[in-house]
Image (cartoon, rainbow, N blue to C red):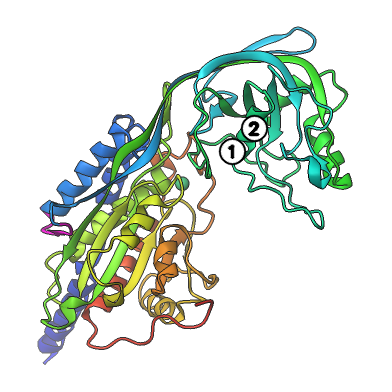
Amino acid sequence: MKKNVLCLLFLAATVHFAQDHSLEASPENLKQTVEYLASPELTGRLAGSEGYNIASEFAAGKMKDYGLLPLFDDGYFQRFNLESNKINSASLLITTQAGKVKSYNVGDGFVCRGFTGRGKVEGETVFAGYGISMPESGYDDYSGLDVKGKIVIIFKYNPAWSIEGIKFPPGTPRQKSKTANAKGALGIIMVSLPNDKNPQKTIGSVMAGEGEQLIDFPQIHADIDLVNDLLEGCGYDLKTLQTIIDSTKKPFPVGLQSRAMINVDSEYFPDALSQNIAGMIRGNDPILQNQYIILGAHLDHVGKQGDIYFPGANDNASGSAALLEAAKILSGNKSLKRSVIFVLFTAEESGLFGSDYFAAHLPVDTSSIVAMINMDCIGHGDSLQIGGGKSSNGLWSVISKLDSESDNIMVSSTWAGGGADSEPFFRAGLPTAYFVTTKSYTHLHCLTDTPETLNYDLLSRITSLAARTVQHLAAASSLPVLKTGGSR
Ligand SMILES: [Zn+2]
């Protein structure tokens, strides 16, 4: 009897363990994939670059290894054209008013904006506040300032305040550069707002906004300290200048006697080719297999500039590795009645171009999609936050229940709408959930977003939860209403 009870206990334990184990992610696998994707060979995975293409081949190879069906007629790739900018080298030389000369290589004191123009430009510097010029409305950061043949220094972002009756332009790098360029400036130095609680560091970014590429107009983002050196002798430091402008809501342009020389070698490709990568597990129910769950993550990052590259370990080698690991875990799972699509998006970093394209060119009917789950920046931080819960409360509750039955890594705060690559699917009216860790952004778009800064235990638990969620949604005979409340 005693022996039988022990046997039963052992059996129960084995069965329980076997069930959990089948959907458990491996921290070692995840680490290996992150390390590869963030390695120098992949040069920061910029959409349209060779590094991104290598990452794409790697991901498609994994999908094939795991037995995923190619989602498209001609394979795992969904190709389309997008703009891409290759930055071969960049340097900066400044001469302060007092004659002190300092030289900087890219990554040290400054970085280029992703869509910088090329050229070697040299001139006096001027400070033009937020870089907004609307003389007809009475607000002009350039008022009385001669910028012809000079280098303009501006705040990277628009003011947090507004003036009644005036609608400021979008404040994108492209729009601000266009304004400076039209006034005859040779190049632009953007700087973070020094009075922010945590002023933004100089970051790699390919978010340019709408508009034409200014081929011969260098655009850089410089450290606050470096800009203070350029301001030396003018009577104000950057903090004071921001305080004056913000407290009066009036422009405060300053001509300077320092000089800057920016030298950028870059190549602009208006029609580079890039691709989303997607594979599928076909559900085994003859009817329900025509319904789909989408698991997505973006594979691209912000690339390289000269000799430096942005590894993007958390953003988003972590989500990409999780996606491939989830595909591995779920391939061969006999419980899946519905079909599961695994997709890695390109060009999230320049404005969600990959997920937008995928959502607009779906190979299946939008109405047959049950839910879309996106993973972006899930390797650094200390717990999991799931966005979209106020609009897709049914879906959020399913995940929350699965979490409470397992690792308890979720926080209860969430938001309405989509966000990141879940956004185009949310806009299409679908239930979405967006996985991101809390305190995820310590190293966002910095050179320090490296594999060593990731928590692989947390990443593997999040991957397991994503896999369990997909399994649950794909295996259930019937599902609750997933999209409830919130806008749309
Ligand atoms: Zn990013």
Q: Position of residue 225 (x, y in %)?
A: 70, 27
Report helix, strand or loop for mark 2: strand
Mark 2 or mark 1, which is nearer to you? 1
- Location of mark 2 (residue): 190
Q: Residue at x 65, y 38 (%)?
A: 156
Give the CA distance from mark 2 to mark 1: 8 Å
Instruction: Look at the image and give the residue range highlighted in magenta.
Output: 65-72
Q: Which residue is nearer to you in this view: 311 or 98? A: 98
**Amino acid, disc 2:** Met
Q: Which residue is nearer to you in this view: 403 or 327? A: 327
Q: Residue at x 57, y 28 (%)?
A: 219
Q: Position of residue 374 (x, y in %)?
A: 38, 62
Q: Is residue 298 left or right of residue 228?
A: left
**Disc number for residue 173:** 1
Question: How many marks do you count on the picture?
Answer: 2
- Label 1 near ligand 1 (CB < 8 Å): no
Q: Residue at x 34, y 73 (%)?
A: 371
**Amino acid, disc 1:** Pro
- The answer, for residue 329, to whether it is visible in the render is yes
Q: Residue at x 43, y 76 (%)?
A: 396
Q: Is residue 383 left or right of residue 248?
A: left
Report helix, strand or loop for mark 1: helix
Q: In the rendered structure, are the residues bearing label 2 and label 1 in contact, judged by CB atoms less than 8 Å apart?
A: yes
